[in-house]
Image (cartoon, rainbow, N blue to C red):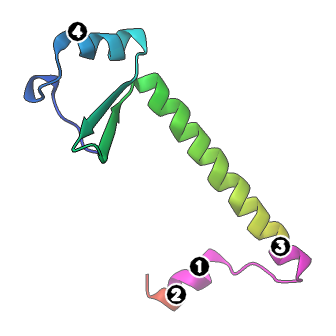
Amino acid sequence: MTTLKASKTRIPPEIFGEVAYGGARVRIVKNKAEEIYLVSKKDIEILLMLEDHYWAETAQKVIDEAKANGEKPIPLDDVRKELGL
């Protein structure tokens, strides 16, 4: 993730405060097609937790499928050796 100091952006201080301290969400549009969103740290933490949950659930499905097919896991050390790591 890229980090910028607020002083290096053109975000109006009142908008920055609304997002940082009030939990507001701001949509920024450029040329009607390009959008970015300014969200609070709390919102990012929630999104990261959702992402972690998604990938954990996806991994569990793959593990369950492999077990159902009688496949055995490959030890990490074996994978590292095969890849030269």
- Give the side of residue 70 with respect to residue 7, left or right: right
Q: Nearer the viewer, mark 4 or mark 1?
A: 4
Mark seen at residue 77: 1
Q: Amino acid at mark 3?
A: Glu
Q: Which residue is mark 4?
A: 14
| Residue placed most toward the observer, 56 or 50 | 50
Where residue 50 sits: x, y (%)?
A: 60, 40
Q: Is residue 66 above or below residue 11?
A: below
Q: Mark number for residue 81?
A: 2
**In front: label 4 or label 3:** 4
Q: Residue at x 89, y 83 (%)?
A: 70
Q: Assess whether mark 1 and mark 2 are in contact (beta carbons under 8 angstroms).
A: yes
Query: Which stretch is magenta?
Result: 66-81
Lower position in the chain sequence, tag 4 or tag 3: 4
Residue assigned mark 3 = 65
**Distance of label 2 from label 1 (alpha carbons):** 6 Å
Verify whether residue 45 appears in magenta: no
Disc 1 is placed on an element classified as helix
Q: Residues within 10 Å of mark 4 (few under 14, many from 20)?
A: few
Question: First in sequence: mark 3 or mark 2?
Answer: 3
| Position of 71 relative to 8 (above/below) | below
The crowd level at tag 2 (other Cα within 10 Å; few <14, some 14-19, many 20+) is: few
Q: Secondary structure at mark 3?
A: helix
